[in-house]
Image: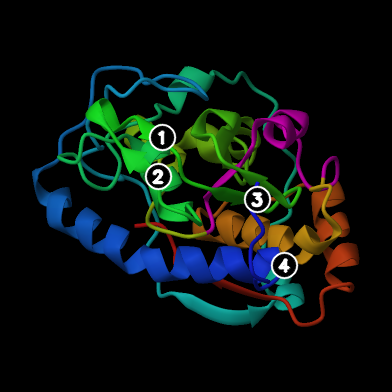
């Protein structure tokens, strides 16, 4: 790996990169939403093919509301609803992913669009949106990755955790929207496959990223995603967030309720 100039801390770099690219993705979503229809195909798992499915037609049952900007982390945690987890069945296929992403016409699915958005060094986009070259920073473990195949796109709040925190009652379209959420910089993140798979379905009371510098960013991301999608937290999760937030006095949470 070549020597690079000093960069901002991983958490700051991640937020700068994602914040800078979010308006473009949002504009694409607004441009195509009116003509989208629900897909019949079930998308792949953590390593999808280049074949993309259609975006959902709507998000029936989704709450509205104004964006919440810059709340201190501890205050944002206080907005979460504490409730025992749903213990019913979970089927990963109920959360269809990856679909055609923010731009159904670019030949890329959600995973590929996220990798393009988060690249520190842009990869070459080939036929079928095959990505070669490029460079990414996995903020969970502060590892620089130069092969897209070594990355997973992680749902900050895992699909099974979301299911037990309220998503079990959602419509299929809303679950698909959650699983492919490119409209917010808080829902999906490109990280090393090793850290994503060590995390699995576990919440913050059970797993935290190994890089010390990642803690506060991860707590912001977790809390912001739960608030955006009105997902609940169990008592152990809430207590862990509250305890760890004391180590992040400058952390803030920005989120916009999911449409």
Using the numbered discs, state the Cα–Cα distance from disc 1 to disc 3 in whole angstroms: 39 Å
> Is there any visible trace of residue 207 in the rendered image?
yes
Q: Which residue is mark 2?
A: 123
Using the numbered discs, state the Cα–Cα distance from disc 4 to disc 2 in whole angstroms: 37 Å
Using the numbered discs, state the Cα–Cα distance from disc 1 to disc 2 in whole angstroms: 5 Å
Circle 1/circle 2 CB separation < 8 Å: yes
Quadrant of image for the C terminus: bottom left
Circle 1/circle 4 CB separation < 8 Å: no
Residue 26 position in % (x across, y down): 29, 61
Q: Which residue is mark 3?
A: 232
Residue 139 position in % (x across, y down): 68, 53
Neighbor class of circle 1 (other Cα within 10 Å; few <14, some 14-19, many 20+) is some
Is the residue 253 above or below the residue 213 in the image? below
**Circle on res. 77:** 4
* For marks 1 and 2 on the same chain, the one whose residue lies earlier in the sequence: 2
Region in magenta? 186-207
Q: Nearer the viewer, residue 22 or 141?
A: 141
* For marks 1 and 4 on the same chain, the one whose residue lies earlier in the sequence: 4
Using the numbered discs, state the Cα–Cα distance from disc 3 to disc 2 in whole angstroms: 37 Å
* For marks 3 and 4 on the same chain, the one whose residue lies earlier in the sequence: 4
Q: Nearer the viewer, mark 1 or mark 4?
A: 1
Residue 179 position in % (x across, y down): 45, 37
Q: Nearer the viewer, mark 1 or mark 3?
A: 1
* For marks 3 and 2 on the same chain, the one whose residue lies earlier in the sequence: 2
* Residue pictured at 72% horizontal, 67% vertical: 77
Q: Secondary structure at mark 3?
A: loop
Is the residue 58 above or below the residue 130 in the image? below
* Residue pictured at 46% horizontal, 18% vertical: 93
Residue 51 position in % (x across, y down): 27, 22
Q: Which residue is mark 1?
A: 132
């Amino acid at each position: 790996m070549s020597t690079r100039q000093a960069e901002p801390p991983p958490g700051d770099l991640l937020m700068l990169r994602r914040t800078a690219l979010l308006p473009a993705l949002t504009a694409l979503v607004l441009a195509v939403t009116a003509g989208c229809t629900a897909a019949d195909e079930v998308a792949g798992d953590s390593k999808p093919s280049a074949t993309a499915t259609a975006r959902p037609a709507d998000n029936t049952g989704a709450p509205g509301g104004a964006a919440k900007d810059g709340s201190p982390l501890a205050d944002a945690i206080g907005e979460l609803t504490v409730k025992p987890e749903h213990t019913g069945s979970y089927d990963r296929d109920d959360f269809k992913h990856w679909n055609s992403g923010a731009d159904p016409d670019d030949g890329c699915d959600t995973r590929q669009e996220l990798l393009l958005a988060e690249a520190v060094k842009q990869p070459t986009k080939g036929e079928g949106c095959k990505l070669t070259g490029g460079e990414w920073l996995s903020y969970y473990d502060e590892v620089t990755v130069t092969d897209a195949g070594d990355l997973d796109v992680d749902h900050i709040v895992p699909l099974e955790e979301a299911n037990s925190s309220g998503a079990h009652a959602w419509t299929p379209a809303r679950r698909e929207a959650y699983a492919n959420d490119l409209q917010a910089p808080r829902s999906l993140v490109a990280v090393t496959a090793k850290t994503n798979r060590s995390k699995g379905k576990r919440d913050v009371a059970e797993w935290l990223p190994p890089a010390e510098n990642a803690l506060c960013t991860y707590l912001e991301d977790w809390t912001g995603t739960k608030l955006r999608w009105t997902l609940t937290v169990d008592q152990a999760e809430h207590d862990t967030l509250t305890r760890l937030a004391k180590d992040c006095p400058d952390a803030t949470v920005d989120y916009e309720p999911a449409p």
